[in-house]
Image: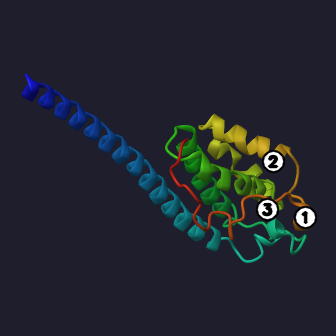
């Protein structure tokens, strides 16, 4: 009888340890996937931003009030940027991107959407995003809040060196 009790206890302990290992594996996998998404989208963001023509981002940084001259090429850069943002938005809304990462990206996306160059170019490319009404509304709402404030009046956000740069603490924690 005593051997039977030992076997039952060992079975229960084994089940508990297996369940704990499985839960830890799932938690760890979630963190790793969020980290990979974060790094991949940061790399894509850097490529998209580097493709903007000279002077196009000055208005975002408030270094100059002059917008770049309209051209056939200029709307392609905001289109690429907004495609990237719509993917990030989708991943967040579907629960594939942690709240912590979205909390870093969202204020900077909104700030970029309120920049003079994105406001102007949005009018040319907005129809491209009507197929995704939630993101379309996100852009419209961000732009409706008004232009970006000058840097000295801008509210402090998460202290990161660039819009999508750095690595947030706790990647992949609860969504």
Q: Position of residue 120 (x, y in %)?
A: 80, 56
The mark that comes first in sequence, 1 or 2, is: 2
On-image quarter of the N terminus: top left
- Is 45 rendered above or below residue 24? below
Residue at the location (40% across, 51% down)? Answer: 28
Label 3 element class? helix
Q: Quadrant of residue 140?
A: top right
Foreground residue among 91 and 81: 91
For this orientation, the residue located farthest to the bottom is 54
The mark that comes first in sequence, 2 or 3, is: 3
- Is 79 rendered above or below residue 57? above
Distance of mark 3 from mark 1, alpha carbons? 15 Å
Are there few (<14), some (14-19), or many (20+) residues within 10 Å of tag 1? few
Residue 150 disc label: 1
Label 1 element class? loop
The residue labelled by disc 2 is 143
Q: Quadrant of residue 52?
A: bottom right
On-image quarter of the C terminus: top right
Disc number lying in front (3 or 1): 1
For this orientation, the residue located farthest to the front is 2
Distance of mark 1 from mark 2, alpha carbons? 16 Å
Distance of mark 2 from mark 3, alpha carbons? 12 Å
Are there few (<14), some (14-19), or many (20+) residues within 10 Å of tag 2? many
């Amino acid at each position: 009888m005593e051997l039977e009790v030992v076997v039952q206890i060992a079975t229960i302990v084994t089940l508990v340890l297996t369940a704990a290992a499985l839960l830890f594996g799932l938690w760890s996998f979630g963190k790793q996937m969020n980290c990979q998404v974060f790094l991949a989208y940061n790399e894509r963001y850097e490529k998209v931003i580097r493709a903007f023509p000279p002077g196009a981002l000055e208005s975002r940084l408030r270094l100059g009030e002059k917008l770049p001259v309209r051209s056939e090429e200029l709307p392609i850069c905001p289109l690429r940027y907004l495609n990237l943002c719509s993917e990030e938005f989708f991943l967040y809304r579907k629960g594939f991107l942690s709240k912590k990462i979205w909390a870093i990206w969202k204020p900077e996306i909104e700030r970029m959407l309120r920049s003079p160059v994105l406001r102007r170019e949005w009018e040319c490319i907005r129809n491209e995003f009507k197929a995704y009404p939630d993101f379309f509304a996100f852009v419209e709402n961000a732009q409706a809040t008004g232009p970006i404030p000058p840097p000295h009046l801008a509210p402090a956000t998460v202290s990161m060196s660039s819009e999508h740069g750095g690595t947030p603490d706790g990647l992949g924690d609860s969504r």
